[in-house]
Image (spheres, grey):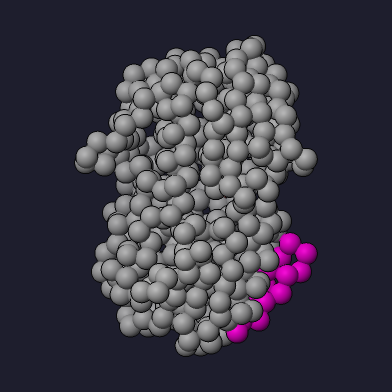
């Protein structure tokens, strides 16, 4: 393991080019592989998780290539046209890649085996297997429904109506991806709406997808099955979840002002922005526009005092990957921040509730877990730091605590920097480029 250390920075300044969105990148590769023709993808995230998806699509007969200018192209085989992979598909650390891929496999009349790294092999997959079995696939997994597992795709997939028992865009997307191969209409009901990149991108490739919300706020997504998907170029927005790290760093280091151009602001993803603004953050949206069916804007972030807030549970799906970095912001705020309804954080790349609590405690911040709520007592600008944080194979834990170290009195060390490459290759260089002082290993 290669550790990394972050030391107190002078002011942060300048412009930073955040890499492409992880969620959109997975979907672009998968749907490109299921479309007829060649899809050009600009701004694809070249992180480990995405490269696993690219390899898997290639192993099943799509042609995936990168040109020297960084544009990727996928030549697809059409819905239902993928070939049985010769070897085990290894999804690495990628929960999204694995779960969406199960949906793709379930809609193909073939047998495929899937595994992942030690973190992914511990994560619950039964939430995806349950609806996919209803659609006719057979899934044989280890105890607890975990990887490695085998998917025997349905020869005649059935359309279903499925109500999500947990708010999860991954489960929704797996059902919709399998639904591409089913005749008739496949519907997913979401009591708490989650990110809608799959729906948007299926439409972009020519599928008919209806979205409606009833009077109780339940969202119904309906896909008309067996569409002819046609190649359609994709411009991947820059990842809001990755932008969150320099954004919080700039809020914390006195005298900072940074610009983050072209950040994806899908309303089902940007709950952190709402929360930070409620805390009093100075974040300006400039040049709001739409690109490739997704809203984007340039964000200008300036330092300022933050105050503690209560984050309601219904906001969780729109900021599910941002609680670690929000907890860091909360540590520097005045007063208490209560984040409610975080059960899903326990089954991410690591148990993030435990990881946040341990990391904050190691750096002199008082934190409590009450049921599924996390309570951080803010230190009003002055945090001791000096802790060593266990990353537990979780990229966002590593980046969040390195962000913390830019503003703590003593340096913060994370024990493993490698997982950052799954979603944010070049994190250290980007942060140092705007004035942070982060070193890897013995540098
Ligand atoms: C994702 C959905 C979320 C999120 C993950 C990406 C997606 O997971 O945590 O990083 O791209 O669909 P869940 O759907 O399990 O909440």
Name which residue lies at 71% across and 74% down: 368
Q: Is residue 326 magenta?
A: no
Q: Is residue 196 left or right of residue 429?
A: right
Instruction: Give the quadrant of residue 176.
Output: top right
Q: Is 157 situated above or below 105?
A: above
Residue 62: x and y, percent? 41, 23
- The residue drawn where x is 35% and y is 68% is 431
Q: Main secondary structure of the magenta part?
A: strand
Residue 428 locus on image (x, y percent): 37, 65
Residue 135 in sight: no
Q: In the rendered view of the protein, which quadrant contains the C terminus? A: bottom left
Q: Nearer the viewer, residue 232 or 272?
A: 232
The residue shown at (60%, 53%) is: 349
Visible in this render: residue 199?
Answer: yes
Q: Is residue 366 magenta?
A: yes
Residue 374 rendering spot, x and y as whole percentages: 68, 68
Across and down, in percent, residue 57 comes to: 45, 28
The one of 321 and 120 positioned closer to us in this rendering:
120
62, above or below 238, in the image: above
Q: Is residue 165 left or right of residue 107?
A: right
- So how many labels did they put on this image? 0
Q: Residue at x 22, y 40 (%)?
A: 68
Q: Quadrant of residue 77?
A: top left
Question: Which stretch appears magenta?
Answer: 364-376
Q: As rendered, which of 85 and 319 lies closer to the eye?
A: 85
Q: Is residue 224 left or right of residue 411?
A: right
405 left or right, relative to 433: right
């Amino acid at each position: 393991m290669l550790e990394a250390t972050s030391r107190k920075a002078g002011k942060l300044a300048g412009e930073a080019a955040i890499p492409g969105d992880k969620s959109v990148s997975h979907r672009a590769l998968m749907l490109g592989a299921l479309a007829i023709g060649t899809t050009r993808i600009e701004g694809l995230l070249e992180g480990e998780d995405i490269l696993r998806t690219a390899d898997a699509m290639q192993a099943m007969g799509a042609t995936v290539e990168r040109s020297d200018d960084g544009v990727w192209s996928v030549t697809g085989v059409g819905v239902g046209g993928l070939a049985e992979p010769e070897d085990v598909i290894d999804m690495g650390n990628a929960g999204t890649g694995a779960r969406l891929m199960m949906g793709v496999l379930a809609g193909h009349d073939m047998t495929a085996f899937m595994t992942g790294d030690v973190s992914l092999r511990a994560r619950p997959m039964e939430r995806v297997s349950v609806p996919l079995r209803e659609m006719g696939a057979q899934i044989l997994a280890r105890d607890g429904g975990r990887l490695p597992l085998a998917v025997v795709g349905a020869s005649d997939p059935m359309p279903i109506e499925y109500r999500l028992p947990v708010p999860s865009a991954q489960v929704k997307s797996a059902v919709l991806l399998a639904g591409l191969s089913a005749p008739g209409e496949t519907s997913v009901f979401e009591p708490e709406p989650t990110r809608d990149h799959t729906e948007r991108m299926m439409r972009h490739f020519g599928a008919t997808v209806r979205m409606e919300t009833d009077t109780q706020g339940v969202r119904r997504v309906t896909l008309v099955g067996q569409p002819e998907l046609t190649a359609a170029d994709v411009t991947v927005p820059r990842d809001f979840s990755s932008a969150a790290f320099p954004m919080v760093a700039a809020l914390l280091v006195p005298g900072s002002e940074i610009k983050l151009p072209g950040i994806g602001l899908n309303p089902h993803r940007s709950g952190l922005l709402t929360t930070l603004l409620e805390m009093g953050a100075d974040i300006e949206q400039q040049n709001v526009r739409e690109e490739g069916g997704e809203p984007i804007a340039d964000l200008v972030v300036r330092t300022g005092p933050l105050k503690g807030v209560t984050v309601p549970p219904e906001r969780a799906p729109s900021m599910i990957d941002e609680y670690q970095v929000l907890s860091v912001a909360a540590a520097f705020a005045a007063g208490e921040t209560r984040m409610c309804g975080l059960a899903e954080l326990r089954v991410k790349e690591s148990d993030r509730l435990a990881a946040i609590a341990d990391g904050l405690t190691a750096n002199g911040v008082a934190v409590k877990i009450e049921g599924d709520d996390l309570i951080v007592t803010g230190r009003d600008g002055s945090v001791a730091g000096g802790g060593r944080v266990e990353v537990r194979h979780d990229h966002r834990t590593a980046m969040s605590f390195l962000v913390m170290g830019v503003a703590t009195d003593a340096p913060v060390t994370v024990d493993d920097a490698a997982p950052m490459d799954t979603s944010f290759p070049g994190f250290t260089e980007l942060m140092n480029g705007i004035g942070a002082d982060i070193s890897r290993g013995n540098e």
